[in-house]
């Protein structure tokens, strides 16, 4: 038997309307539980066991939503902002009633993999410093890189505030006198960390994209600015090694 929840809250959470609208629907006989008309929202139901009909249509209860977004440049990782567009503006209004939020932050000019959910426990476990969840980025750097840089990142880069980063894995994809393309995997999430790590060796990040979080990679077929629900396999990859 699953966790019981107030009927009016369940209906509201599933996007059927506000609590007050549910009160009216119940009063006028629009809700049935296991074939019986229920007229009070205070009634508690088990969404995993009970059959709930709203205006004759079965209500399928979904507690948590997990979406993957390919974040574009120009959006901030927040639920609301007075001055900038937020990543939630890219999510269909069909999900509005779930009270979604982004898991962690990507800078306004950073693109790539961003998880959108309403599962606070999952977000905590993915972001908690003691979990050391790896995050991999693709970056364009405004100068040459070689073995010395790889060694510096392996040993731990010291940031401008004196913080020494945990060992990071730097892979140089291509390099020239004017520009390098790299993959970088870090195990923490300090403010502007990737940009500050390269600034510490006198280089600048000109493009940044997150391509992997834990075992979950950004799908090749997910266009920039688009989102979709995670598959079961992707959810397993995202949460591998994490105690939920």
Image (cartoon, rainbow, N blue to C red):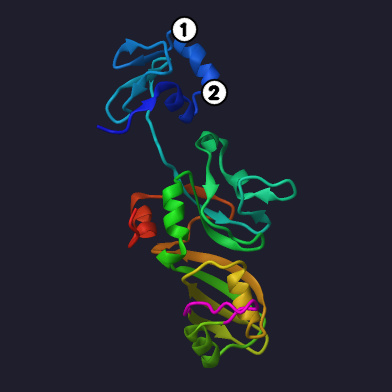
Residue at point 47%, 30% (across, down): 13
Is residue 11 depicted above or below 129 in this figure? above
First reached walking from the N terminus: tag 2 or tag 1: 2
Residue at point 30%, 13% (across, down): 35
**Predominant secondary structure in magenta?**
loop
The residue nearer to you, when weighing 130 against 169, is 130
Which residue position holds label 1? 28
Is residue 143 depicted above or below 72 in this figure? below
Q: Position of residue 45 (x, y in %)?
A: 33, 24
Q: How many marks?
A: 2
Q: Can residue 163 be found in the magenta stretch?
A: yes
Q: Give the magenta part as a residue range.
A: 158-168
Q: Position of residue 112 (x, y in %)?
A: 55, 61
Mark sitting on residue 18: 2
Extreme residue in the top direction: 28
Q: Can residue 162 be found in the magenta stretch?
A: yes
Q: In the structure shown, which secondary structural element does the residue marked by tag 2 occupy?
A: loop
Q: Position of residue 149 (x, y in %)?
A: 55, 88
Q: In the structure shown, which secondary structural element does the residue marked by tag 1 occupy?
A: loop
């Amino acid at each position: 038997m699953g966790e019981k929840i107030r009927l009016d809250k369940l209906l509201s959470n599933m996007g059927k309307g506000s609590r007050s609208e549910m009160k009216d629907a119940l009063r006028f006989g629009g809700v049935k539980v296991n074939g019986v008309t229920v007229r009070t929202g205070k009634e508690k139901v088990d969404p995993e066991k009970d059959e709930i009909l709203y205006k004759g249509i079965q209500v399928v209860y979904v507690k948590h939503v997990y979406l993957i977004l390919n974040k574009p440049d120009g959006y901030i990782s927040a639920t609301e902002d007075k001055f900038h567009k937020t990543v939630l503006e890219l999510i269909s209004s069909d999900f509005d009633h779930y009270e979604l939020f982004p898991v962690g932050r990507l800078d306004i000019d950073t693109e790539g993999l961003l998880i959108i959910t309403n599962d606070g426990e999952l977000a905590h476990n993915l972001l908690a410093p003691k979990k050391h969840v790896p995050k991999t980025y693709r970056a364009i750097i405004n100068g040459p890189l070689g073995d010395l840089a790889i060694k510096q990142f392996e040993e731990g880069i010291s940031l401008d505030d004196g913080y020494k980063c945990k060992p990071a894995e730097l892979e140089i994809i291509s390099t020239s006198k004017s520009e390098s393309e790299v993959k970088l995997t870090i195990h923490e999430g300090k403010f502007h960390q990737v940009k500050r790590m390269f600034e510490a060796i006198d280089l600048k990040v000109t493009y940044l994209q997150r391509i992997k979080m834990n075992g979950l990679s950004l799908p090749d077929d997910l266009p920039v600015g688009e989102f979709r629900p995670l598959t079961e396999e992707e959810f397993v990859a995202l949460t591998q090694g994490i105690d939920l």
